[in-house]
Image (cartoon, rainbow, N blue to C red):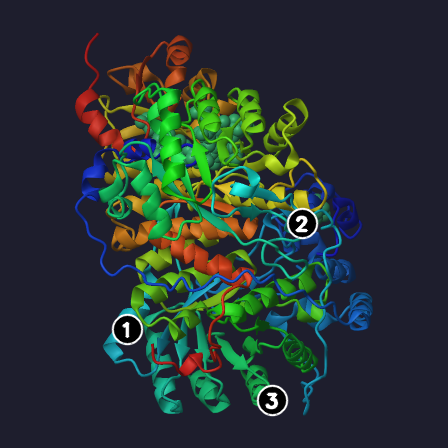
């Protein structure tokens, strides 16, 4: 798979097996209450017990110098000599932990969508960024929760049955499709992928693609992402026309990359008031370079830049994607002004993993893989969740269950989920 | 680890450059100690009496920040902890999170045995090895020491996996320990109430022990107290709440514990951390919802510092993402997983069998190899040395070239005239643009396969053997 979505290509990835994906029903989907999403800012962390901490450090130093033999040989050769000490009371103590001094630069805030007061027609806007620490950490407030934008395509495409079952009724109408993801699946935003513009698919004209964008803008009142087909020759023109049609709406233009005419996309964003998605492929220096070019060479304002450092699926390069994002976020927090932008992930890429869609394991030595209808959504969830912990802000997703579960966990860690307290002291004796 | 340069380590080594460690110089060996690719015991001279003092000093200085603890015995014994960094890119994480799955003493015996076997035998092939799970946690639900001992006995007869004995009642723990006292099980758990008696058990049976408190001050008190009593194989359970603000609190405690242990170097709290994603089942009763949420909790704490965890769901859709995410986080970022370059026989190839080219990135190589062997395609498979980069990235980055491909066959002394009747090679679909260059460099007939190796069988039906020109 290549970059986010390109589900058109997923179809070919599935190859002969796509047939096997059809005609299967999901039984007993997961039900999770979406509840009310408050926006309470994260509780500020009270700095504690500096004196205790200093004492601790001193103790450590003397330990190291005094060199305790028991510790060196620990476990294997417990000190055989002296009889163990017995204590009748717990040693009193206070836990303390240091703060991270180098996180001094907050992540840039980026506003998506524009309401009538700002020259758009969206009902409300979404703000990404503003973090002062790694996600959900206690070091500093995380002002905005994670958001999810769901994929809509401008033509029917191949997808795994587990996904397709949800969209069969709207697959021929991007506007209806967009309404459905917002109304039924709780999408915060909608991504309209103009894949039919690819000369190798339908070669839809930029003008016609722009009409589709208008339809989607009329169908829903949430902010939207406008995605090209991924064709580097055609995308700049398509995105330019679409940007014009959506003038003033502060959409995300997806994407500017180093291998196409990014300047033209940047120009369109400036002229028609949109946000540029700066997309690179798992390479922190390439990300810096493109962001720098967008800012310095093209004059895009900081508040109009979002990054997509590339998402690889769980089991297929997520280790690279995770560490790439974590490094970018740490660099941003520590003052790298070319990297401190909010991030977006093509989480739908998770469906490229064989484990997400194959009927069963191609290897007979494997334990049973079980029903694939359950494997697909959890593959999407875990791919997204892992990246959320690395600092990702916006998720481009496909499966409704995956969307709900990812929302539930990211908002829980963000701190806006109120639930009845649970007593975990008795888990050992619980009858499950 | 208290040292961060080879020079600092070098000062403690014998400095004779005798080469017995396999490195030419002590300095080279020192570098391996720093990146933890070798152990101090690999240097025979330093084990001699004359160096005893230096050996002991160096061992202390080289010890990982987070204490490393062994659970179980024998081949499937498991080490946990052992970390030196808080982000994987700073070095790598050591000792992948140990996954323990629960059984309970009120299970009918046949179900218990079946469940234990399922845990023991779970496996998922991934880049050249099987991902597996690690331990069995026996929960005492009955409250009856004899029943618990019987369950532990049955589990111990059924598996060689390490065990975790779970009860807050010291008498019950003792009954279990009696059964498996030579197996180095982990006992769960000491808390504020029972700590005195549990400490006695840890001392008597010399086993590692979990300390449980959702209050970090209390947890630290327990750790200090146990350490003072000479019990240092400790695991900390700061409580895994399944939802809401309580879960956010759990997350914060994990982060705080690990940061204090590594960044602040607070040795007396630098122990492995335990998560209990099983607690998802306390709020979700339906199996799919509970399994999904358990997997979510397991993932959060695989990424953020869980060294060992207790799980319940044996659904494949829970276990597969769990083991894959653990692999994601613990794989060594310093070196891409590679296989030996060379030309390998898959099945029993003849002169009419195809010769297939791929890269030596382990994920690529093993995916292709398993696609071929599971479809019973006899062939030669060439792993070209691309420094462990996959096909598409290696073509883009210049590690997979016609010259490299030609070299691979040369180095392997693979003579197409002698080994094949067709003098043809098949390139991956994603390397199609190398076709002309490879023809020129090798003089062979070059065929282009499909983009995904899973489709080689279908492609072969149409394209193999190559039609005469
Ligand atoms: C992980 C990854 C990386 C990792 C690579 C890690 C590694 N050890 O390989 C890192 C971060 C290092 C990386 C770097 C780069 N990457 Co990269 N990367 C990816 C990513 C996300 C996944 C690739 C992967 O691992 N796939 C899984 C493996 C198993 O696939 P595979 O090797 O291709 O094998 C399959 C097939 O080829 C086939 N197959 C294999 N052998 C054979 C043999 C035969 C006969 C047949 C028929 C089939 C067959 O079957 C296999 C199983 O399906 C892809 C995007 C994506 N595809 O999702 C981009 C991608 C491959 N990268 C890309 C690029 C451009 C780069 C960089 C050049 C970026 C840069 N500017 O620096 C560098 C180059 C680095 C280098 N070569 O030194 C591009 C390539 C574009 C192109 N087509 O030219 C991609 C497609 C992203 C994109 N859309 O732009 N990348
Ligand atoms: S074995 Fe020890 S003394 Fe000999 S070269 Fe290696 S490190 Fe130096």
Q: Residue at x 53, y 36 (%)?
A: A250
In-front residue for pair B152/B99: B99
Q: Estimate the x, y position of residue A148 in percent, counting from the top left.
A: 45, 48
Of the numbered discs in the image, which one, if any, rests on residue B113? 1
Mark 1 or mark 3, which is nearer to you? 3
Q: Is residue B227 visible?
A: yes
| C-alpha distance separating marks 1 and 3 | 34 Å
Discs 1, 3: same chain: yes
Q: Give the side of residue A208 with respect to residue B25, left or right.
A: left
Q: Estimate the x, y position of residue B287 in percent, counting from the top left.
A: 30, 67
Q: Estimate the x, y position of residue B220 in percent, counting from the top left.
A: 67, 76
Marks 2 and 1, the one that precedes in the sequence: 2
The single residue placed furthest to the front in the displayed view is A117
Q: Estimate the x, y position of residue B437 in percent, counting from the top left.
A: 42, 11
Few, some or many residues within 10 Å of mark 2 (<14, 14–19, 20+): many
- In this figure, which residue is indicated by the disc labeled 3? B196
Quadrant where the N terminus of chain B is found in the figure: bottom right
Label 1 C-beta lies within 8 Å of the nearest ligand 1 atom: no
Q: Residue at x 67, y 85 (%)?
A: A84
Q: Residue at x 70, y 60 (%)?
A: B59
- In this figure, which residue is indicated by the disc labeled 2? B33
Mark 3 or mark 2, which is nearer to you? 3
Height in image: B433 above or below A156? above
Mark 2 or mark 1, which is nearer to you? 1
Instruction: Check the residue under mark 1 and report the chain it is in.
Output: B
Height in image: B139 above or below A101? below
């Amino acid at each position: 798979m290549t970059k986010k979505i390109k589900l058109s290509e997923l179809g070919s990835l599935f190859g002969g097996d796509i047939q096997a994906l059809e005609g299967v029903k999901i039984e007993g989907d997961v039900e999770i209450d979406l509840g009310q999403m408050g926006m309470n800012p994260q509780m500020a962390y009270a700095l504690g017990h500096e004196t205790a901490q200093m004492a601790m450090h001193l103790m450590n130093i003397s330990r190291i110098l005094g060199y305790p033999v028991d510790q060196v040989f620990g476990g294997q050769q417990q000190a055989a000599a002296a009889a163990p000490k017995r204590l009748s009371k717990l040693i009193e103590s206070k836990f303390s932990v240091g703060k991270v001094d180098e996180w001094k630069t907050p992540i840039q805030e980026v506003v998506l969508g524009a309401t009538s007061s700002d020259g758009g027609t969206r009902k409300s806007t979404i703000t990404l960024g503003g973090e002062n620490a790694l996600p959900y950490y206690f070091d500093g407030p995380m002002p905005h929760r994670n958001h999810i934008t769901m994929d809509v395509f401008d033509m029917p495409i191949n997808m795994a049955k587990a996904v397709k079952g949800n969209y069969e009724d709207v697959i021929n109408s991007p506007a209806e499709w967009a309404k459905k993801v917002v109304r039924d699946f709780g999408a915060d935003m909608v991504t309209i992928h103009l894949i039919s513009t690819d000369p190798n698919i339908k070669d839809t004209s930029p003008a016609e693609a722009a009409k589709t964008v208008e339809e989607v803008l009329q169908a829903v009142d949430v902010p939207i992402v406008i995605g090209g087909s991924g064709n580097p020759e055609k995308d700049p023109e398509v995105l330019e026309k679409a940007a014009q049609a959506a003038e003033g709406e502060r959409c995300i233009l997806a994407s500017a990359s180093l291998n196409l005419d990014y300047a033209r996309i940047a120009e369109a964003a400036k002229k028609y008031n949109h946000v540029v998605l700066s997309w690179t492929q798992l390479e922190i220096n390439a990300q810096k370079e493109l962001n720098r070019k967008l800012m310095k060479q093209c004059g895009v304002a900081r508040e109009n830049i979002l990054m997509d450092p590339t998402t690889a699926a769980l089991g297929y390069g997520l280790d690279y994607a995770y560490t790439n994002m974590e490094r970018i976020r740490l660099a941003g927090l520590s003052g790298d002004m070319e990297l401190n932008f909010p991030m977006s992930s093509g989480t739908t890429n998770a469906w490229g993993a064989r484990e997400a869609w194959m009927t069963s394991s191609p290897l007979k030595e494997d334990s049973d893989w079980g029903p694939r209808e359950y494997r697909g959504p959890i593959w999407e969830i875990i791919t997204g969740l892992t990246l959320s912990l690395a600092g990702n802000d916006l998720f481009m997703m496909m499966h409704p269950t995956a969307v709900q579960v990812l929302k539930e966990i990211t908002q829980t860690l963000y701190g806006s989920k109120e639930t009845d307290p649970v007593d975990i002291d008795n888990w050992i004796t619980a009858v499950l | 680890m208290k040292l961060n340069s080879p020079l600092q380590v070098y000062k403690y080594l014998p400095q004779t450059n005798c080469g017995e460690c396999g490195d030419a110089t002590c300095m080279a060996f020192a570098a391996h100690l720093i990146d933890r690719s070798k152990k101090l015991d690999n240097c025979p001279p330093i084990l001699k009496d004359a160096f005893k003092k230096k050996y002991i000093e160096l061992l202390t200085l080289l010890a990982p920040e987070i204490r490393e603890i062994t659970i179980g015995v024998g081949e499937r014994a498991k080490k946990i902890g052992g970390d030196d960094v808080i982000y994987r890119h700073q070095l790598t994480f050591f000792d992948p999170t140990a996954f323990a799955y629960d059984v309970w003493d009120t299970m009918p015996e046949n179900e218990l045995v079946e469940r234990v076997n399922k845990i023991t035998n779970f496996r998922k092939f991934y880049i050249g090895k099987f991902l597996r799970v690690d331990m069995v946690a026996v929960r005492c639900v009955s409250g009856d020491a004899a029943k618990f001992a019987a369950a532990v006995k049955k589990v111990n007869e059924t598996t060689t996996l390490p065990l975790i004995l779970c009860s807050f009642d010291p008498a019950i723990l003792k009954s279990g320990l009696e059964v498996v006292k030579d197996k180095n099980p982990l006992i769960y758990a000491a808390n504020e109430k029972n700590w005195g008696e549990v400490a006695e058990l840890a001392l008597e049976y010399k086993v590692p022990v979990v300390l449980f408190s959702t209050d970090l001050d209390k947890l630290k008190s327990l750790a200090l107290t146990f350490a003072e009593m000479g019990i240092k194989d400790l695991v900390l359970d700061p409580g895994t709440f399944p939802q809401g603000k309580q879960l956010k609190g759990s997350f914060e405690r994990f982060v705080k514990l690990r940061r204090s242990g590594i960044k602040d170097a607070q040795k007396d709290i630098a122990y492995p951390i335990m998560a209990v994603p099983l607690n998802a089942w306390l709020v979700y009763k339906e199996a799919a919802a509970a399994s999904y949420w358990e997997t979510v909790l397991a993932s959060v704490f695989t990424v953020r510092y869980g060294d060992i965890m207790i799980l319940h769901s044996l659904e494949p859709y829970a276990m597969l993402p769990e083991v894959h995410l653990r692999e994601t986080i613990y794989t060594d970022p310093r070196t891409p997983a590679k296989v030996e370059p060379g030309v390998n026989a898959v099945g029993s190839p003849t002169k009419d069998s195809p010769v297939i080219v791929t890269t030596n990135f382990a994920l690529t190589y093993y995916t292709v190899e398993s696609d071929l062997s599971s479809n019973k395609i006899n062939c030669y498979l060439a792993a070209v040395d691309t420094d462990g980069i996959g096909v598409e990235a290696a073509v883009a980055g210049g590690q997979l070239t016609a010259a490299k491909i030609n070299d691979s066959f040369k180095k392997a002394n693979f003579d197409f005239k002698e080994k094949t009747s067709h003098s043809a090679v098949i390139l991956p679909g994603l390397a199609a643009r190398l076709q002309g260059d490879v023809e020129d460099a090798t003089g062979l007939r070059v065929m282009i396969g499909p983009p995904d190796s899973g489709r080689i069988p279908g492609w072969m039906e149409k394209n193999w053997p190559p039609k005469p020109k």
